[in-house]
Amino acid sequence: MEREAKQKEEAEGAARDQFPPPPPMTQQNFIQYMQLVEERQRVTLEQQNKFFQDLLQQNRVERPENPGVTLADFQNTKPISFAYAPEPMDAEDWLMDTERKLNTVGCNDQEKVRYATHLLCGPAASWWDNIVAVYPAGKVFTWEEFARKFRESNVPESIVELKRREFESLEQKDILTYVREFSKLSRYAVEEVNTEDKKKKRFLRGLSPQFKVQLRMMRAMEFQELVDAAITLEDDFKQLQEEKRKKAKFEPKRFSNNKPNTSLNFKPRYNNLLW
């Protein structure tokens, strides 16, 4: 054991003699060393930052942050195409329904115009092509511009005024027809039916006198209740008329016993002629 320990000590001594310890580091050498370490850390950090920036940029290209609303997204709302509207308010309904669906999927202003005009077909598509042709190429239409031009073409003020006058002169023929026409034409005269009381008064004004008198006595009811009461009243009236007609058919006819008066003495003119 002593021999082994002695041999180990001799080996360590020989190693120390072969590799002498480094000279002590001066302050200047220490500063240079620390500057070298900091420089290497800075370069490593820059390389790491560049790597992550390149990775983020690649992700942005592959998956854009705001891809917008696609045509397929809009078509999932099942929009209705538009060619021509027989009634102005049908065109207004289409415009409002389309705008509601465009807002539902979050379309921006340009997407609204692009997808709404995509729904135009037939005469409406030709109309829009003519509108676009008037402006310089590349003209970008806002939704407000499209909606205004659409209404000017399909909901013209002149037609709206005619429909409003038609509503003002609307009178009952049969109740169901009157109710349908009242509902359709009242949309052209909103100021006359924009409250429950106005609507009831205008509805009563167009009824026939036999219904008007009875229904005016029921002032506490809502408009829809008034309509239902008018329909029921007309049905009762028709049944009453039918019963009267049946009774009149089976009742015996009354004949008068008065005989015609034949005592009148008519003298023919030829008796006074001289031959």
Image (cartoon, grey):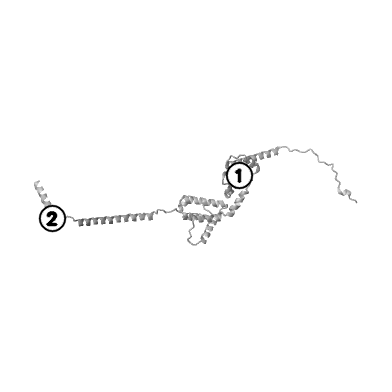
Q: Residue at x 22, y 56 (%)?
A: 31
Q: Position of residue 70 (x, y in %)?
A: 45, 53
Residue 96: which numbered mark, if any? none
Residue 79 in sight here: no
Going from the N terminus, do you reach mark 1 or mark 2 first?
A: 2
Q: Position of residue 256 (x, y in %)?
A: 77, 38
The residue closer to the viewer here, 38 or 20, is: 38
- At label 2, the amino acid type is Gln
Q: Position of residue 86 (x, y in %)?
A: 57, 52
| Picture layout, residue 130 above or below residue 271 | below
Q: Decide: marks 1, 2 in contact (CB < 8 A)?
A: no
Callout 2: SS: helix
Considering every residue shown, the one lying at the far front of the view is 27
* Tally of numbered discs: 2
Q: Residue at x 57, y 48 (%)?
A: 191
Q: Residue at x 52, y 59 (%)?
A: 131
Give the labeled residue for mark 2. 18
Residue 201: which numbered mark, if any? 1
Callout 1: SS: helix
Q: Position of residue 222 (x, y in %)?
A: 57, 41
The CA distance from mark 1 to mark 2 is 120 Å
Q: Residues within 10 Å of mark 2 (few under 14, many from 20)?
A: few
Is 168 on the left-hand or right-hand side of 103?
right
Is 200 on the left-hand or right-hand side of 99?
right
- At label 1, the amino acid type is Lys
Of labels 1 and 2, the one closer to you: 1
Residue 18 in sight here: yes
